């Protein structure tokens, strides 16, 4: 018999649900969180909820103020630009290492992840597309074999997840992502690190520009 996936613990369930609610905009930047209301909504006690809230605060997705409690972090324009600048530096290092050490199994996984993104986009499932896109990029990052770098990058991605979901709401952006991902896969298949880095810079830059417009408008 094949192994069954272990059901999530209460803290894992709560953490996953809160991540989803932030990503899809059910919890919006700046919104205060009432722990009793959230616990009732999720059908859990306050203990696993507090554990999940602490985790999200450590990742920068929530902010905590004494006597006020938690609220969803609001990303400023300067925060956004800093996050993307740091990503440029770290992801460039990761990609160079990945191209140098990765084998064809990574290419197969990257190609499969590209298909997942396109399928979610075609179905109009923005939450699935957000997750598939993240998987696509972290196939490359994980292939670098630098777990500390990968953990830092996951935290940086977490801080902009809700804005990325909004970015995919535009069909033109979804189409652009599909074309850019295809080019990224080909560059990796050719083991052309310089072209791959350039394409990723352009891909990242288009998202940052769109998110910058969103933040200026709000």
Image (spheres, rainbow, N blue to C red):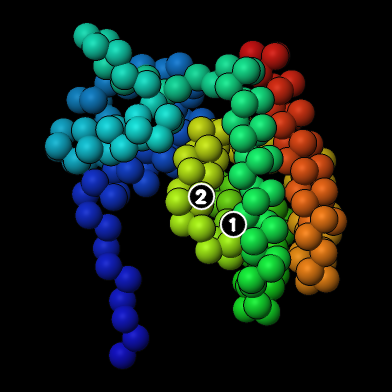
Q: Which residue is mark 2?
A: 149
Q: Secondary structure at mark 2?
A: helix
Q: Nearer the viewer, residue 142 or 28?
A: 142
Q: Nearer the viewer, residue 75 or 93?
A: 93
**Quarter of the image that includes the C terminus:** top right
In the image, what residue occupies the spot 39% across and 26% down?
A: 62
Residue 67, picture quadrant: top left
Expressed as whole percent of the image width and height from the top left, the position of residue 18 reads 37, 38
Left/right placement of residue 208 relative to residue 1 reads right
Residue 100, picture quadrant: bottom right
Q: Secondary structure at mark 1?
A: helix
In the image, what residue occupies the spot 76% across and 66% down?
A: 188
Around disc 1, counting alpha carbons within 10 Å, would you say few (fewer than 14), some (14 to 19), or many (20 or more)? many
Q: Are marks 2 and 1 in contact (CB under 8 Å)?
A: yes
Q: Which residue is mark 1?
A: 141
**Whether residue 77 is situated above or below residue 47 in the rendered picture:** above
Q: Nearer the viewer, residue 87 or 109?
A: 87
């Amino acid at each position: 018999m094949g192994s069954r996936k272990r059901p999530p613990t209460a803290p894992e369930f709560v953490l996953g649900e809160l991540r989803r609610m932030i990503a899809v905009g059910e919890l919006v930047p700046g919104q205060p969180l009432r722990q009793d209301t959230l616990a009732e909504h999720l059908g859990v006690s306050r203990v696993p909820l507090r554990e999940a809230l602490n985790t999200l605060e450590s990742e920068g997705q929530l902010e905590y103020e004494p006597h006020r409690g938690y609220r969803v972090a609001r990303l400023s324009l300067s925060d956004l630009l800093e996050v993307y600048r740091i990503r440029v530096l770290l992801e460039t290092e990761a990609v160079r290492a990945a191209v140098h050490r990765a084998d064809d199994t990574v290419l197969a996984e990257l190609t499969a992840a590209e298909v997942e993104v396109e399928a979610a986009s075609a179905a109009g499932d923005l939450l699935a597309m957000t997750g598939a896109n993240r998987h696509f990029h972290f196939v490359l990052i994980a292939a670098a074999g630098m777990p500390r770098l990968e953990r830092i990058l996951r935290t940086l991605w977490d801080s902009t997840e809700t804005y990325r979901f909004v970015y995919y709401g535009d069909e033109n952006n979804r189409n652009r992502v599909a074309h850019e991902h295809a080019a990224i896969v080909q560059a990796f298949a050719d083991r052309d690190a310089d072209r791959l880095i350039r394409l990723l810079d352009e891909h990242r830059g288009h998202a940052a520009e769109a998110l910058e417009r969103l933040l200026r408008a709000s």
